[in-house]
């Protein structure tokens, strides 16, 4: 049969990753069995696989701030705790790889890429979502109450990581621009569906249009 494929949504925080992940979900891509909860910043949801996000939290020694994102670094790769974590992560990926078409979204993949990518045995397609850095920074400022210059610094750092990943990635890649999706959701869905290899549908278009009506703040 067809080779299993993982669709990776790659983007910095507040750049439209949730919008793209939600679109994929409405196009029939399996994004996980449990998601992080919607909130006032993303009323339509984040579409982040809770199991993987939880493991990413632990790996990055997360302190609820994108600012603290750093390269994955375990001081003792041989410790029982680390081995157990890696084993759990591997098992989670193996479960997902039983599905023919699945996806993942977590802006912190910019910091976890090598580790995540090396776990995969299936085919990979990357959708790179981009938004004007100033807009993302203002969104972070509203979302986290961070000062604008610190928010912009976060965006720049994430973008540098993302650009390096893309420069070294040779597989199928689709660039999507936030403003273009907002301007013409139908055309954007057509492009995304063709790239993924599925048929576009009105649910996906309505998902984006509904987000616009709700003053959707992209993450």
Image (cartoon, rainbow, N blue to C red):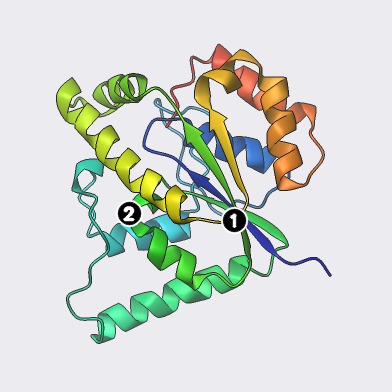
Say which of marks 1 and 2 sits in front: 1
Provide the secondary structure element on which disc 1 rests: loop
Q: Residues within 10 Å of mark 1 (few under 14, many from 20)?
A: few
- Percent position of residue 177, x then y: 53, 27
* Image position of 159 (left or right of 168): left
Residue 24's x, y, as percent? 65, 41
Say left or right for 217 vs 147: right
144 left or right, relative to 179: left
Residue under the image location 71 percent in, 46 percent down: 196
The x, y position of residue 17, in whole percent, is 48, 37
Asked whether the residues under the numbered discs 1 and 2 touch, taking CB atoms below 8 Å apart as contact, a structural biologist would say no
Sequence-wise, the earlier of marks 1 and 2 is: 2
* Residue drawn 53% across the image and 43% down it: 47
Q: Is residue 45 visible?
A: no
Q: Mark 2, residues whose alpha carbon is within 10 Å: few (<14), some, or many (≥20)?
A: some
In the rendered image of this protein, does residue 213 appear above or below residue 159?
A: above
Q: Which mark is residue 111?
A: 2
Q: Nearer the viewer, residue 166 or 187?
A: 166
**Observer-nearest residue: 188 or 32?**
188
Q: Which mark is residue 209?
A: none
Q: Which residue is mark 1?
A: 171
Instruction: Classify mark 2: helix, strand or loop.
Output: helix
Q: Residue at x 46, y 60 (%)?
A: 51
* Residue positioned 27% across, 63% down in the render: 72
Q: Quadrant of residue 122?
A: bottom right
Above or below residue 52? Residue 201 is: above
Q: Position of residue 211 (x, y in %)?
A: 56, 21
Image quadrant where one finds the N terminus: bottom right
Residue 88 in view here: yes
């Amino acid at each position: 049969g067809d080779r299993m494929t993982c669709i990776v949504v790659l983007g910095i925080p507040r750049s439209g990753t949730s919008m793209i992940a939600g679109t994929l979900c409405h196009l029939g891509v399996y994004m996980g069995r449990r998601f992080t909860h919607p909130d006032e910043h993303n009323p339509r949801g984040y579409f982040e696989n809770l199991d993987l996000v939880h493991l990413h939290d632990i790996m990055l020694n997360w302190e609820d701030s994108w600012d603290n994102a750093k390269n994955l670094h375990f001081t003792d790769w041989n410790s029982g705790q680390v081995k157990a974590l890696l084993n759990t992560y591997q098992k989670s990926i193996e479960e997902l790889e039983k599905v023919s078409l699945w996806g993942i979204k977590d802006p912190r993949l910019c910091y976890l890429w090598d580790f995540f990518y090396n776990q995969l045995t299936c085919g990979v397609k990357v959708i790179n979502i981009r938004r004007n850095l100033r807009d993302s920074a203002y969104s972070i400022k509203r979302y986290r109450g961070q000062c604008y210059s610190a928010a912009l610094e976060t965006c720049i750092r994430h973008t540098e990581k993302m650009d390096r990943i893309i420069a070294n990635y040779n597989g199928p890649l689709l660039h999507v621009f936030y403003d273009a999706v907002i301007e013409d959701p139908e055309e954007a869905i057509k492009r995304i569906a063709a790239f993924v290899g599925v048929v576009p549908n009105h649910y996906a278009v309505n998902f984006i249009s509904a987000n616009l009506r709700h003053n959707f703040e992209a993450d």
